[in-house]
Image (cartoon, coloured by chain):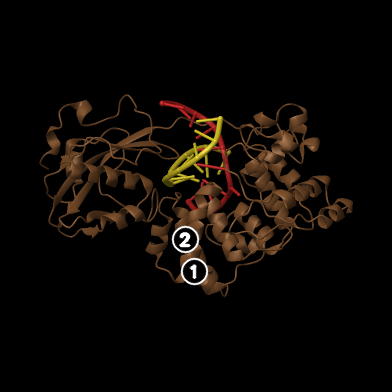
Chain colours: A brown, B yellow, C red
Amino acid sequence: MAHRNGKEERRFQRPRASKPSTLRESAEVSRIAADLLAWYDRNARVLPWRTPPGAGPADPYRVWLSEIMLQQTVVATVKPYFGRFTTLWPDVVTLAAAPREAVLAEWAGLGYYARARNLHACAGVVTRDHGGRFPDTVEGLLTLPGIGPYTAAAIAAIAFDRPVAAIDGNVERVMARLHAIKTPLPAAKPRIRAVADAAVPAERPGDFAQALMDLGATICAPKTPRCAECPLAGDCAGRLRGLAATLPRKTPKPPKPARTSAVYAHFRNDGAILIETRPDSGLLGGMIGLPGPDWTKHPPTPETIAAAAPGAADWQRAETEARHVFTHFSLTLGVLVATGPALQGRRYMAFEAARAAAPTVMRKAMEIARAGLRDGARITASAGVKKNTPPDEGGARWGRAAGPRQDFGKL
DNA sequence: CACACGTGGGT
DNA sequence: TACCCAAGTGT
């Protein structure tokens, strides 16, 4: 068993013995790089956007797509999305030609939706301005939307074999431990940059970049590093000083505020649900959602809620609220439900299609609305919407906590 | 530099 | 349960 996290990762077979030993003898290559590449030859994870160790660069389109999806997102979450995207759009030209809303709908659930907007924009630029080929330098890649310093370096190294350091959270952690850097992040970034740059080998820089990430993901883990299995343990100052698990140090994060609001779920008689497209910028930009008042610190008043109604109907308040935690705040949404003929000037979408295309918080609200509908607008919890649910905060509630459910019957 | 920007899984 | 965290970018 290679890992204790329960998921046995598959490995590329066929270790390559000659390359690492050759590298080890080269004065150009650090012992760190040589040891790490030797480890990678035996332990590289098999991923759909990768080539086996030593096999050379992978398809730049697939490298780019995977790197965008992997921003702040774990491999297991990305895999099914990557599969669907590459089936639908096998190359950058195809992706550029796709309707933006189709791309956003396919991205739904992955989070950080600016990535999807930039992805589509980037595909357009590469197709129209670069003949459908990605720039092969860091500087060139950096000009593209959604590609920052990390991603530019990662694509340059992995897809074009450029000897550059791709510094992400994994690399920061590995370097902080390797060199026992006790300065907290982000202040330590310049020093980490320096040691990471110095570690990049002239040969197999793409494999080196991926090896560092695999090491960070499987061995040099954030909480409990498995130093006993680490190919760099002998050179790790953090381990030698008993500091590995405590590095890198970070400045503490401020607490998350709570916000509260409501959403309207109107079901047309055929079961379709009323949706709207959110403004293109900001939270959940460009994604579909349910209408409702702004999300505020204090619960909206009945008047504010009424003013945000998409139309007149017998609105019933579902008993369950939709709860969701974003990066910088937690949210509680009351769900108002009604059924009837189409409301004037509003857009409807088949329920299943709407749920599929909606961001997670809106999926939760839709599920609750449908469950309420099924049980006559007074139901309890709906199954399958438990994830990412914040604690029951003592205050900041409206409706029952403020009194009877009076004002929501007829709006 | 600080903050906005999602989500799901691990501990 | 509550908090941490993950292959960051844009402003």
Q: Nearer the viewer, residue A80 or A140?
A: A80
Q: Secondary structure at mark 2?
A: helix
Amino acid at the residue labelled 2: Arg
The amino acid type found where label 1 is placed reads: Gly
| Residue furthest out toward the bottom | A131
Q: How many marks?
A: 2
How many C-alpha atoms fall within 10 Å of the one at disc 1: few (<14), some, or many (≥20)?
Answer: many
On the picture, is A282 further left or further right than A33? left
Q: Are marks 1 and 2 on the same chain?
A: yes
Residue A4 position within the rendered picture, expressed as x and y whole percent measured from the top left: 61, 36
Residues under numbered marks 1 and 2 in contact, where contact means CB atoms less than 8 Å apart: no
Q: Quadrant of the N terminus of chain A?
A: top right
Name the residue rendered at 73%, 50% in the picture. Answer: A42
Tag 2: Cα neighbours inside 10 Å, few (<14), some, or many (≥20)? Answer: few
Task: Say which of A108 and A344 sits in front.
Answer: A108
The residue beneath circle 2 is A84
